[in-house]
Image: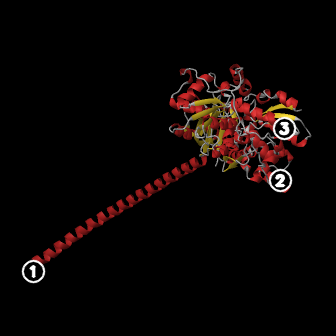
Amino acid sequence: MKIMDFLPANCKNCYKCVRNCHVKAIKIVDDQAQIMEDHCIGCGQCFVVCPQNARNIKSDLNKIKNSMQSTKKMIVTLAPSYSGIYKKPKKLIAALRALGFEIIEETAIGAEIVSDLYKEYMDNHNDKKNLITSCCPSVNLLIQRYYPELLPYLLPVVSPMIAHSILLKEKYGQNSFITFVGPCISKRCEAFGYQETGDIDAILSFEELDTWLAEEGIKLNDLEDAYLDSSASSYGQRYPLEGGILKGIEDDITANGYRSVSVSGIEDCKDLFETLTTDNIENLFIEANICANGCINGPAVSKDSENVYIRQLHVDDYLEDKESEDYTLNNRRVYNRVFTNKKVTKKIATEEEITEILKSIGKYDKSDELNCGACGYNTCREKAQAVFEGMSQPEMCIPYMRSKAEKLSNLIFESTPNIILLLDENLNIIDVNPACESAFLINSNLSKGNALSTYLDDSDFRQVMETKQNIVNKRVHFKNYNITVNETILFLPKQNLIMAILYDVSKLEKKNKELIHLKKNTLEAADNVIVKQMRVAQEIASLLGETTAETKITLMKLQQVVLGEEGVTK
């Protein structure tokens, strides 16, 4: 079951998650980020830095709400970091009760159980070369997947969350519903198997809790203070702070011949673990936290929360010097944990394969390998290895894609027959293309920074800059250059620049004039022909008129002759 991933609809292909993933567990497929769960350590940093908030994390919220309607006893194990993250922690307890939770106890009780189990383990296994705490699920996954040779150092004890949940089930009945509330994303990974066995039922992040309270219209400031049903002593409450685990067991660490070391933050953890695998370092008792400054800086908190240093002060202010609650571990074995080797294996590319991949992204020699890290990998060779594994794509090389885009845009800019000018807000020339140089005799290099008015009438350009209204396809004739153009002048508001594209229609204008002249000559010739035809017709008509008259006279004479002859006969 997929516990966490990105929402494809929101992923904007920015690679920020890849750059911030310290174990490179994010794969880019079709320009979308995907979490490889068998590589992931669940730290949640990719979600913290995602500008689109494209997180898709398995949620137990509906399961919790449905259980509220059942007869189960609803119980919260509350991570001790709540006292630092919330300004008024007692009102948070009241809010949890308002939501319907019946019993609320501190996970710090589980922390004290874990500390006691650590002490017992040291007393019985002080021959171990080094020891590493196992409270942080992401640290456990980091060692299991990337430093399995350190598995013998991991203390084989469950986390405070699981220890407290087991205790709560024994205390309130196996049918009770236990919800862990805290700032951690990797707790979901840890809890998954324990949810299957029924040791814990649900995980609720502080971020989800805030959203739920807002949906229910519950405002912390409107509530009266409420109190925990059971709480831990101050050393259990210090667990979310860096060094907090060590605080309560320092004497035992020293007594067993170990030196205490606290490390937090992924890179610092990796550096220390790398050192442990390569150098002969002994007798260290290591408190390791993936989150810098400890759990108080967990990723699943509201973005409006105060910074980590203020949170630390809040925890210190809230600490109470009191005795721990009494507890009895009926079955110590259920608090034991076995960590297994989950080593991530990678197929390594040959030198020839690396070289070919580098060439495909325009890196033909060492000088082309910028190692800028924009793709998320420290070096170009690491990036090529990721491409070989299918974790990355060649197009993720930003310098290469930029160079490719610039070459294409430069090709268009240099080759287009259209005249292109780019001007600043003062109508000074920023750049012109070769077509402009040829048309207006403007030298690109020498003209930069000069006023456009030095070369051309800038009235239309000034109008666009002043009104912010574009001019599109205006026919303009530049008399000094004997050029006629279709003028498009665009205002670019984001850049506060002017871009002009002038389409030279001089040849078309000349052809149009020649066509008009040809038509005029043709009409004149046709008119002359018609005039001649009319003259001929008139001459013909005149001749026909004369001959017709003569014919008529002749006929009349002939008629008279004929009639005269007939008269004689009679």
Point 52% across, 36% down: residue = 68
Which residue is the site of mark 1?
Answer: 569
Image quarter hosting the C terminus: bottom left
- Classify mark 3: residues with Cα within 10 Å, few (<14), some (14-19) or many (20+): few
Which residue is the site of mark 3?
Answer: 124
Q: Position of residue 229 (x, y in %)?
A: 61, 27
Quadrant in the picture for residue 79 = top right
Q: Which of marks 2 and 1 is in front?
A: 2
Visible residue check, residue 474: no
Does residue 237 sit above or below 205 in this rendering? above
Q: Calculate the distance from the C-alpha at mark 2 to the C-alpha at mark 1.
A: 135 Å
Camera-side residue of 70 and 167: 167
Q: Calculate the distance from the C-alpha at mark 3 to the C-alpha at mark 1.
A: 177 Å
Q: Position of residue 2 (x, y in %)?
A: 64, 47
Camera-side residue of 497 and 159: 159
Upstream in the sequence, badge 2 or badge 1? 2
Question: Mark 2: which amino acid?
Answer: Thr
Upstream in the sequence, badge 3 or badge 1? 3
Does residue 532 sit above or below 34 in this rendering? below
- Classify mark 1: residues with Cα within 10 Å, few (<14), some (14-19) or many (20+): few
Circle number at residue 355:
2
